[in-house]
Image (spheres, rainbow, N blue to C red):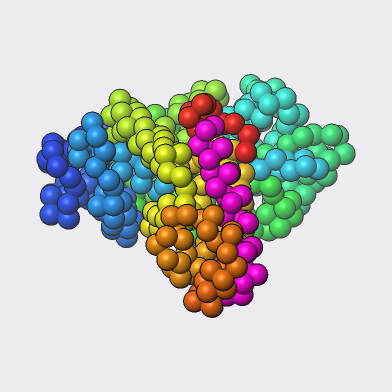
Amino acid sequence: MFDNLSQGLEKAWDMVRRDGELTADNIKAPMREIRRALLEADVSLPIVRQFVASVEAAALGVKVVKGVRPDQQLVKVVNDELIKLMGGQQEDLVDPKDGPQVILMAGLQGVGKTTACGKLALALQKRNKKVLMVATDIYRPAAIEQLVTLGQRVNVPVFEMGTDAKPADIAAAGLAKAKAEGYDAIIVDTAGRLQIDERMMRELGDVRAAVQPTDTLLVVDAMTGQEAAGLVKAFNDAAELTGAILTKMDGDSRGGAALSVKAVSGKPIKFVGTGEKLEALEPFYPDRTASRILGMGDVLSLVEKAEASIKEDEAEALAQRLLAAKFDFNDFLKQYKMVSGMGSMGSIMKMLPGMSAITDKQLGAAEKQFKQFEAMINSMTAEERSNPDLLAKTASRRRRIARGSGHRELDVTSMLGTFTQMRARMQSLSQMLKAGGAAGAPG
Ligand code: GDP
């Protein structure tokens, strides 16, 4: 799995220069290689296009980091974008507060759906849940038998009503039993067809309506490539999926489905099947999968460390500037301009120890206030800016500044009060930074 993709991407890294920075010009060739590698992994063209565009944008936006080469930087960018493509976080099953967890399993025939039921039953048992499986495939008696056999292997009872009842009725009866007998989870296996089939989809929708699942999982064979898009869409339309299980990840598939499911459906892959044994089910981790594809764990941690140390350097430099300056109005304005120039105040403020709890609303208000401050400071003389105490002493100066900046004298006095508090706060903050690094002193 992923072998060809990994090799294809390796070619891309080789094309990146080893010094200088990533530019629109010098990433063209490696980007072409990345695109080719993804297409060969059977990812569909629209997804590939979008992926390549976001890698390109991110690559051109990265700052040159000391000790990190451009090719390594590109590896990191591709890693981050792969993680995003696959959904970011690992997503677990939905665990309802009351009532049993109801997991509806959907998928085409032969993809490993019934096996996945057994695997999930085992996994939930390991979470100390009392599990019931429900067989609704009335078209294939063998499928019911298969589920019963799996149930015996993992010691989970299977509810079935033979082949004469309607799937939705069987599912509803199974759920009623689970509720009456205190089961924590039920897993409903459904009929699969070789191809998407209207009747099967309608039935699936009926079963879904009958049991209101907490999770509806589409079981997808990892061999699926581009056709994953149509498949996921059809099932999602019929039964509103909450996620997917990708089976046969142990095979030698090209990996297209693993990369596509989230992008085409917006629904995460929650688990992967990695073998025929019932233990062979694992949560799907986008980050681990990305580093498996890239096979460059050491490069990634190098770049991460370098980037983290830059953030520390920035915070440290900010603290130094705060402390070194007397913190007059000039410093204040400079800080503000620097900070706002870097995007939002928030990212800097939140980096400071003790400030991480500050809310976006508070930040918004602070930024608005800074704007008023800026107008007032712009109306000051050079002397006043470097000596804030002059304003405290002389009312005529405050009046002049109020007029000049379109505020009331009261506003200027209030600004002075805030400024004085801010100065004290900034200075003690920087003391804390100096004393404890980023140890997280309370704010
Ligand atoms: P269903 O028709 O979707 O219910 O498919 P089954 O559960 O009967 O599985 C079809 C075949 O795929 C069986 O031979 C399973 O042993 C096999 N299978 C299921 N999951 C996996 C997996 O994760 N890895 C491998 N290698 N085989 C699997």
Q: Residue 251's quadrant in the figure? A: top left
Frontmost residue, 93 versus 344: 344
Q: Main secondary structure of the magenta part?
A: helix
- Is 301 drawn above or below residue 405 in the view shown? above
Give the extent of the magenta segment: 406-432
Identify the residue at image location x=66%, y=43%.
94
Frontmost residue, 25 versus 397: 397
Residue 429 magenta-highlighted: yes
Identify the residue at image location x=42%, y=60%.
383
Give left or right: position of 382 versus 369.
left
Q: Is residue 168 visible?
A: no
Residue 380 magenta-highlighted: no
Residue reaching furthest to the right:
180
Rendered location of residue 328, percent (x, y): 47, 52
Rendered location of residue 325, percent (x, y): 42, 44
Quadrant that contains the N terminus: top left
- Is 244 drawn above or below residue 393 in the view shown? above
Rendered location of residue 219, percent (x, y): 51, 43
